[in-house]
Image (cartoon, rainbow, N blue to C red):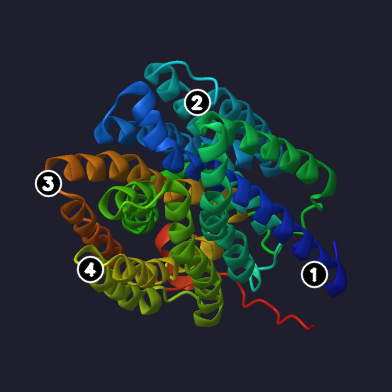
Amino acid sequence: MSAPPPQSTRRTVRITIVLLFIAWLVDYADRLVINLALPSIGAEFDVGRGEQGLIVSAFFLAYALCQIPGGMLADRYGAQRVMLWALLSWSVFTALTGLAWSFAVLLLMRFAFGAAEGVFPPASMKVLVERTTPAQRMGANGVVMSSNALAGVLTPLLVAPLIAAFGWRSAFFSTAALGVFVLVAIRVWLPAPLPLTEPATRVARRRAGGVLRLGVIWRFSAMMFGYSMIVWGLNTWIPSYVSEEYGVSLVSAGALVAIPALAAAGAIVVGGRLSDRLGGHHRKVIVPSMTVAAVTLLFMVFSPSLTGFVVFGTLASVAVSLCYMPILAVPLGGLAAEDIGVGSGAIVFGGQVAGMVAPPVIGALADAFSFKVAFASLVLGAAVAAVMALLTPQDTASFRAATGLPDLPAPAKEHS
């Protein structure tokens, strides 16, 4: 089958990016709503910070457990089909969260919500890989994943006033409705995949599913763990911290959180562009960026003023966000088409384990010592990510050699 005309390819890429951007925006907003609702939930159900952190962890436990099965389902039954079922399921459980009548029921709903969302990331990544060329992939993925940071901007600005006016339950009903809208949009407008740029190989077929036995995949997963430890440690507790430490209202806290989130959105896009330009070589981005992140986190923690906290927190968010796309660049470029779902699921799994661990640990440290001690512990995440960046293959050829796949021929240059 001949390759489609460049204009057709560009149109497929553009539509895919827009639809996945919106889907991830709603996906991430659904997760962030709980952070803004935690003070109200804690008051209604009379639970402390440690128990509040468990609400977040219940989501991430299920989310983490479903990453790899989600990838297997996407590889076996088709990425688009799995992604649509994920959207429908998580929208239902988001709405049911708003109906929870006890702390135990709330934990159960968040677990079910996490399971539904857990199959989405590997399916989404496979959808993108199927509709982009290798040369476009990281730039496109950077744009798509910048939706996470943009959700960090919009969610507090829109949801905090909603909670203040109508209560925390209203926020979950609203975001559930958005999920249904995205489901319909993807079902109607998502383009068909492009012709394969890499033919299926006997090696890949013989080893399908054996990706999980490759140590190199788990080193990338550990890198994602370090990155996500910082992201979820901050995202979960900053609204509560600025409210308690500085007496800021929930609405104002939401506006303050939007500042570093907006800067992070731009940094994710830049990280994707750097990955494409460097052809991988993620340590050139991750090691210096995580070093800056560690330093600015400490300055943020010990800043005597709210202004200093926000400034240094924003710098830390930018430094950390630059690392997101470089973590994924080499694996997504090097994995065989048949292994994209399960391989990306395994890598994202590390990030979700961090999301499961960080919120209750940070909450418990804040209860036992202080938020300063709790936030300072996030420097460990920067150290883990930097070390793993040095211990992983730096380009597609070395990655494929480590996974037992033959190297790919150099891609033809695209003409605009």
Q: How crowded is mark 2: few (under 14 residues within 10 Å), some or many (20 or more)?
A: many
Between disc 1 and disc 4, whose residue precedes? 1
User: Which residue is more in the foreground, 72 or 211?
Assistant: 72
User: As displayed, is residue 369 above or below residue 282?
Assistant: above
Q: Tell me the residue that label 3 is attached to.
A: 369
* Comparing labels 2 and 4, the label whose residue is closer to the camera: 4
User: Which residue is more in the foreground, 123 or 320?
Assistant: 320
- Contact? badges 2 and 1 (CB < 8 Å): no
Expressed as whole percent of the image width and height from the top left, the position of residue 341 reads 56, 47
The residues bearing labels 1 and 4 have C-alpha atoms spaced at a distance of 47 Å
Between disc 2 and disc 4, whose residue precedes? 2
> Quadrant of the rendered structure where residue 373 is?
bottom left
- Contact? badges 1 and 3 (CB < 8 Å): no
Disc 2 residue type?
A: Ala
* Comparing labels 1 and 3, the label whose residue is closer to the camera: 3
Secondary element at tag 1: helix
Between disc 2 and disc 1, whose residue precedes? 1
